[in-house]
Amino acid sequence: MFKMKTLFVAILATGAFLLPGTVSVPSANAEGATVIRFASLAPSGSAFMKVMKAWNRSLKKQTENRVELRFYSGGSQGDERDFIRKVRAGQMDAAGVSTTGLGMVARPVLVLTAPGLITEYDQLERARTQLNDRFAKMFDDAGFKLLAWGEAGKNRIFSVNEFAKPSDLKSGRPWAWKDDPVFAEFVSVIGANPVRLGLPEVYPGLQTRMVDIVPASAIAAVALQWYTRLNYLAKDNFGIIVGGSIIKQEKFDELSKADQQMLIDTSERAARALDTIVRRDDDRAYKSLVSRGMIEVDTSAYKAEWDAVAAKTRQNLTGRVYSKSLLNAVEKIVAGK
């Protein structure tokens, strides 16, 4: 069984599994260090939080104790929707979120998870580097500052029943996260009806066969125990789950220019350390699932059909979720143009 260090990735990948907490949140210190209250879904003892605490130590040292992070982990502040609401209300200052949370602040960012567009880490790195200023402005316009990008593994299709081509999923019951318009559109293009559930409902849904298809990274399927109810997983992924750290602009503006830069620099170093962990553990989780008997599905024989579905999905989301110019820009970067 995978250790708890893998759990944070699963949570980041798909949202929180704890209901909004009733934890009393103290205000940041009025005197002394500027305290940044940071909400996270990661369990306190996870590898994710170990890296976060190392980030805090580095930040405090580099700012000579003028700035420090105070973490509220384990979903104690609710799920990602709660994080965004609380940051906007001033109850939290910052948060580590997945694509879901990022999309609630800057919806066009979801272009990075459009099916079939970015499937390799180097493609993602190029896109988020070359378009970073464009995305950063979206967050700025929404009253947030994007501190650093993150990842949560390769997004694959898992199923109870055998599949190989898109039409094999047509009669299935695919789960779609309530706040995710991307995968819902993907399965709708296939001809299936997405079943909208919150994360706590997915495992029971698999038990009762309310859902029999789920999108997830391998590490999420292991950590959330979904793999115990699934039999097949796609060899090829249709995207990469993107995340990041964001802070309310008003809080960021409380810092001096030098401390602002130090916060960004240390957050980026922490994010890259986490990327290394995520990529390694997601690959290990995939190999573990196959070794345990989950059937690996090679969809390459029907690549043209999958590509057509992905292209149609990207087209349908254009104008609704992201602009055509943004989609074209990402496409050019992925193609190396």
Image: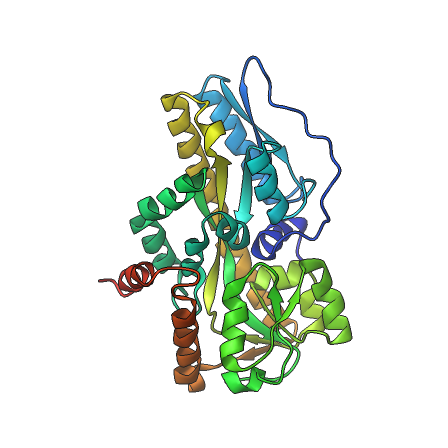
As displayed, is residue 148 above or below residue 194?
above
User: For residue 74, which quarter of the picture?
Assistant: top right
Q: Pick the quarter of the image with the C terminus.
A: bottom left
Q: Residue at x 51, y 58 (%)?
A: 153
The percent position of residue 321, horizontal first and vertical second, equals 44, 60
Q: Residue furthest left?
A: 337
User: For residue 263, which quarter of the picture?
Assistant: top left
**In-front residue for pair 203/25:** 25
**In-front residue for pair 220/87:** 87
Using residue 32 as the reference point, say whether residue 325 is left or right of it. Answer: left
Q: How many marks?
A: 0
As displayed, is residue 282 above or below residue 115?
above
Q: Pick the quarter of the image with the N terminus.
A: bottom right
Q: Residue at x 73, y 76 (%)?
A: 209
The percent position of residue 182, horizontal first and vertical second, equals 50, 65
Q: Can residue 272 be seen at all in this image of the molecule?
A: no
Q: Residue at x 62, y 53 (%)?
A: 11
Using residue 113 as the reference point, say whether residue 156 is left or right of it. Answer: right
The percent position of residue 154, horizontal first and vertical second, equals 49, 63
**In-front residue for pair 69/48:** 69
Q: Residue at x 40, y 69 (%)?
A: 314
Q: Can residue 8 be seen at all in this image of the molecule?
A: yes
Q: Residue furthest top?
A: 31
The percent position of residue 336, horizontal first and vertical second, equals 25, 62
Using residue 107 as the reference point, say whether residue 331 is left or right of it. Answer: left
